[in-house]
């Protein structure tokens, strides 16, 4: 069976940035923990899917995605200084959670969810980077297709459940309201 819309695909691969001796491994999907997704549902980068479309179990692949095809160029305007008051809860700043190197879920003024990395914690401000961690990088994928199949009813139900996930209902004190695999509980 070939990779096409609405097929479940499992891949093993190495994702590196840079090339040759400077190649840095960013992500690895193994036979024990493959990347499994429903093709053509917008779960993966469009250019990624174009490069594997039509492949079948046992086929290997090796391709690269430019920043424009992947996560865009690094944008200095996505690095912002936010008042430490933004991060206060009950008038207290959480120094353990809001620390250099941490990645935090945030929300913009329009209610859009985004992830930000703490670059620096100053006396009055927290410097946050809202670029994707792989922004500006050329991504190199090398791997193999290990499975392609029609989705089972259970896989369709899991996909539907994940799409309907409302992580606002997921919290450590009331996990019974969270019926998703979003990792927020």
Image: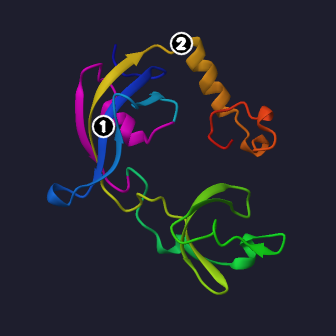
Q: Is residue 47 left or right of residue 93?
A: left
Q: Secondary structure at mark 2?
A: loop
Residue under label 2, please give it: 152
User: Residue at the location (49% across, 21% down)?
Assistant: 6
Image coordinates for residue 68, horizontal then vertical, percent: 38, 55
Of pointers 1 and 2, the one earlier in the residue sequence: 1
Displayed quadrant of residue 175: top right
In the rendered image, the residue lying farthest to the left is 21
Depth check: give the residue in front, 131 or 96. 96
Image coordinates for residue 147, horizontal then vertical, percent: 36, 19
Q: Is residue 7 left or right of residue 102?
A: left
Instruction: Determine whether 172 is above or below 37 in the image.
Output: below
Image coordinates for residue 74, horizontal then vertical, percent: 42, 66
Which span of residues is magenta-colored? 43-68
Q: By what rule are the colours in the image chosen?
A: rainbow
Depth check: give the residue in front, 149 or 31. 31
Q: Is residue 106 left or right of residue 151?
A: right
CA gap between label 1 and label 2 equals: 24 Å
């Amino acid at each position: 069976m070939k990779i096409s819309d609405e097929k479940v695909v499992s891949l093993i691969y190495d994702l590196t940035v840079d090339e040759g001796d400077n190649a840095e491994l960013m992500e690895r999907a193994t036979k024990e923990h493959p990347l499994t997704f429903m093709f053509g549902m917008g779960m993966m980068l469009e250019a990624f899917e174009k490069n594997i479309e039509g492949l079948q179990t046992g086929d290997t692949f090796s391709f690269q995605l430019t920043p424009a095809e992947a996560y865009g160029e690094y944008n200095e305007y996505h690095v912002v200084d936010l008042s430490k008051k933004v991060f206060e809860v009950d008038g207290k700043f959480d120094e353990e959670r809001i620390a250099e190197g941490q990645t935090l879920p945030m929300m913009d003024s329009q209610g859009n969810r985004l992830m930000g990395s703490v670059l620096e914690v100053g006396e009055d401000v927290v410097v946050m980077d809202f670029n994707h961690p792989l922004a500006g990088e050329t991504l190199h994928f090398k791997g193999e297709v290990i499975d392609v199949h029609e989705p089972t009813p259970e896989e369709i139900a899991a996909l539907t459940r994940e799409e309907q996930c409302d992580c606002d209902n997921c919290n450590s004190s009331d996990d019974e309201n969270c019926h998703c695999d979003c990792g927020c509980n």
